[in-house]
Amino acid sequence: MSTTTYREAFRAGLREALAVDDRVFLMGEDVGRYGGCFAVSQGLLEEFGEQRIRDTPLSESAFVGAGIGAALGGMRPIVEIMTVNFSLLALDQILNNAATLLHMSGGQLGVPVVIRIPTGPGRQLAAQHSHTLEGWYAHIPGLRVVAPATLADARGMLATALIDPDPVLIFEQIALYGASGELADDAGPVDLDHAVVRRPGSDVTLVAYGGSLAPALAAAEELAVDGVSAEVVDLRTLRPLDTETVLESVRRTHRLVVVDNGWRSGSLSAEIAARVAEHALYELDAPVERVCAVEVPIPYPRHLEEAALPGPADVMAAARRAVG
Amino acid sequence: MAEFRMPSLGADMESGTVLEWLVGPGDQVRRGDVVAVVDTDKAAIDVECFDSGVIERLLVQPGEKVSVGTPLALIAATGADAGPAPPETAARPRETPPPAPHPAALSPLVRRRAAEAGLDIATLTGTGPGGVVTAADVDHALHPAVPVAAPLVPSVTPGPPEPVVAAAPGARIHVSPYARRLAAERGVDPTVLRGSGPDGVVHARDVPAVPAPVVTNGAGPAPVAATALRRATAALMARSKREIPHYYLALDIDLGPALDWLRAHNRAIPVAARVLPAAVLLRAVVLAAQAVPELNGHWIDDRFVPGRGVQLGVAVSLRGGGLVVPVIRDAGTLGLDDLMARVREGGERARTGRLRSSEAGGATITVTNLGELGVDAVDGVIHPPQVALVGFGAVRPRPWAAGDAVLVRPVVTATLSADHRATDGALGARLLREIDRRLRRPEEL
C-alpha cells in the first residue's frame, strides 16, 4: 500500500494505458503543454510525445468527433472533455455517432472510444462547471457509463474501458482529484459490470455513486454511533446498472435511501427507486428516501453550494426516517 | 375558553387517572406549564397544558379515571385575548419559534424516560429545535450504541401531543409492503396489528415472528414460533371480546338430504374433485349470507358497512397449534365444486404457512367448523371488524323427531355468534334458518 491522490491514480492509469498499447492516445483541451485543466495528464506530454498527447482546439464537437473517427479507424483514443457542462457541446457526437454507429452499421462499426469527463460540484466552480449530469448519459443505450469513486476504481477503470469494444464514458469527480488515500501497489484493471457494497450493514441501504459516495459513507459512520447499521452500495457503473446488487442489499435491509448529487426529477435516483419498486416492493418496509441536489443551478458561494448538495446530515436524516 | 383534556401519553393509553392537580381555580397558567400529574397504569406523568390563561374550573377530581380526550379543566383566556381570536392571530403562534428550553418545554416522554433512568436532564445536550432535549437525546445518553426505538418522537415542542391512537377498526391501515408480505406468509391479518411507525404504519417489526412450518417427522413446532402466532390470535380475540357484544344462537339441522344428494353428486365426478360435507355447509352459509346481507360485512366507526360480495373466512386450525383464517374471495360467485377446490387449496396453504396476500384478511363473515375435533357445537368469537361467525360441530347420527316418529338422522348443530351492535336476534335467527333451508334443498346448492 502507498498513499496517493485520485489525480495520481488517474494519471497512473493513463500512463499504463499509453505504455502497453501503441493505439492508445490522449487528446483534449490543454491536456498536453498545460498538463490538463486539473493536472491529471501532467508530465505525459514529455513522457510520450506530441503524437500521443494531443492538445486540441476549443471545439468539443470537433475533437470528440475526431476521437470517434480514430476509434473507427482502429485506434484506441482517450478523449478528455474539460467538464461535464462542456460535454453538452459534444452531445451530438456522443449520442448520434458514438452510441449509434454499431446499430446503424448493422454491427459492422464498433466505436471503442473512451471519453474522460471531469464532473461534479464541490470546488466553487459555479453553475457552468459544477453539475452532475452523469445520469443524462446513463439514459443512452449504446454507451457504458462509469463513475469511479474510489482510488482503486480511479486507477483501474480506464484499462477495462479500453478493452470494451463500445464507447465508454468515465466520469471523474473534480472534488476528489486532490483527495488522497491508500492504494495497493499492484492496483490494476477493475471490473466494470458490478456495483459494490462499500460498507456492509443490516438496517438500511444507502445507494450512492461518484460524488455522493463520500457523504453516504460519512453518514453510515455517524449512524453506526446511534446503532443504525447502514449498508453502502457504490453503483460504480451507471449504465448498464447492476440492479441485482442493489436488490440483494434491499432484501437484507428492507429500507432504501438513494443519494444522488444530480437533481431529483428524472434522475438516476429515480431510476434506482423505480427498479426497487418494480422488483422488490414486497421487501420494502418503509417508503424509499431520496437525497438529491436541490433543483437549482449549483451556486458559487461555498455555503450555498454545500446547502444545495446532499451532505452527511441529510443522508442521516433520511436514513432515520426510513428506519423509523 | 379552552378545554384542557386528558392527553394520550402513549399509543396504548386509553385512559388515565388524575393523581394530583398542581394548579387550582384562579391560577394563571402558561402554555407548557405542568398542571397535573396523571397515572397511565405505567407511570405517573407530569402533564402540561397547551393554552395560556386562567384556570376557570377543575372538571375532574384527583383519583378519577377518565378516558383520553375527556376535558379535565377549563382555561379562560386573559385580557384582550378573551373571546374567539381572529384566524390570523390563531395562526401566529405556530410561526413563532419554540421558546427557549426550560424544564416545562420538555416533553412528557422525555421527562418520563429521564426520571425512569435517574438522569438529570440538565446534564444532557439537546439536539431539538432551540437545544431542546428530545427523547432521542435521553436514549442516546442511556444507550449510545443501541438502536433507538423511537428517535423521531414528535415531542420536541411543547405543542399538543400528536394524537397517537390505534386506527379505528376497519379504517385504512397503512402496512409496509414488506410487512404485508410477511403477514401473508405467516397467516396473520396485518390489519389487527398495532403499527409502531409514524401515524400507526405497520412495519415488519410489528408482525409476529413466523409460525412453525408444519413438521411431518413428528417433532413439535418450535415453541417461540407458536407463541408468536398465539400473540396475534390473542390480540384479535381480546379485541373482539373487548369491543363486541356477542349474542349466540344455535340450530340443529338434519343433514340427511344434503348427504344423500352429495353421495350422488360425488359419484359423477373424479375422486380428487369430490366434495366434502364441510364444503356443502360453507356453500349454505354463503347463500344464507347473501340472503341476510346485514350479517355479511364490517362494523366500522359505529355503523355497519355491508360487504361487497361474500368474502368467506374459513378458520383452519394448524396441526402444530394455532389458528389461521384464509379468505375465499367472492365466495358467492363460486359453485359448490369450485368452492370445494378453493377450500382445499386455501387450507393447504394455510397449514404450510404460505397463504397468499389475497387470502389474508378482509373476510366479511367467517365459518369455524370443529366437527373434525368431535365436539357438538361451538360458540365462537367474532373476528373484528366482522359482525358474525358461523360455527358447525360434528355431524352425528342423533335421534330426530319426525312427526310422531323418532328417527336416527345425521344431525349437525349450527351456531351463530353475532355482533349485537349490528344486528338483533331476529336477523341472526333468519341466517340460521336460511342455512337450514338451503341444506334441505341440496340440489339448489
Image: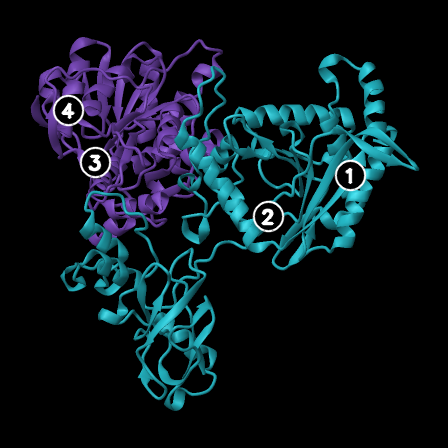
Chain colours: A purple, B cyan
Q: Residue at x 21, y 53 (%)?
A: A303
In this figure, which residue is indicated by the disc labeled 3? A174
In this figure, which residue is indicated by the disc labeled 2? B384
Chain letter of the residue carrying label 3? A
Give the mark nearest the N terminus, 1 or 2.
Answer: 1
Q: CA distance from mark 1 to mark 2?
A: 26 Å
Q: Name the mark nearer the viewer: 3 or 1.
A: 1
Foreground pick, B121 / A117: B121
Q: CA distance from mark 3 to mark 4?
A: 13 Å
Q: CA distance from mark 4 to mark 2?
A: 66 Å
In this figure, which residue is indicated by the disc labeled 4? A9
Chain letter of the residue carrying label 1? B
Q: CA distance from mark 1 to mark 4?
A: 87 Å
Q: Secondary structure at mark 3?
A: helix
How many C-alpha atoms fall within 10 Å of the one at disc 1: few (<14), some, or many (≥20)?
some
Residue B23 in percent (x, y) is at 32, 81
Q: Are marks 3 and 1 in contact (CB under 8 Å)?
A: no
Q: Name the mark nearer the viewer: 1 or 2.
A: 1
In this figure, which residue is indicated by the disc labeled 1? B252
Relative height, residue B41 to residue B93 (above, below): above
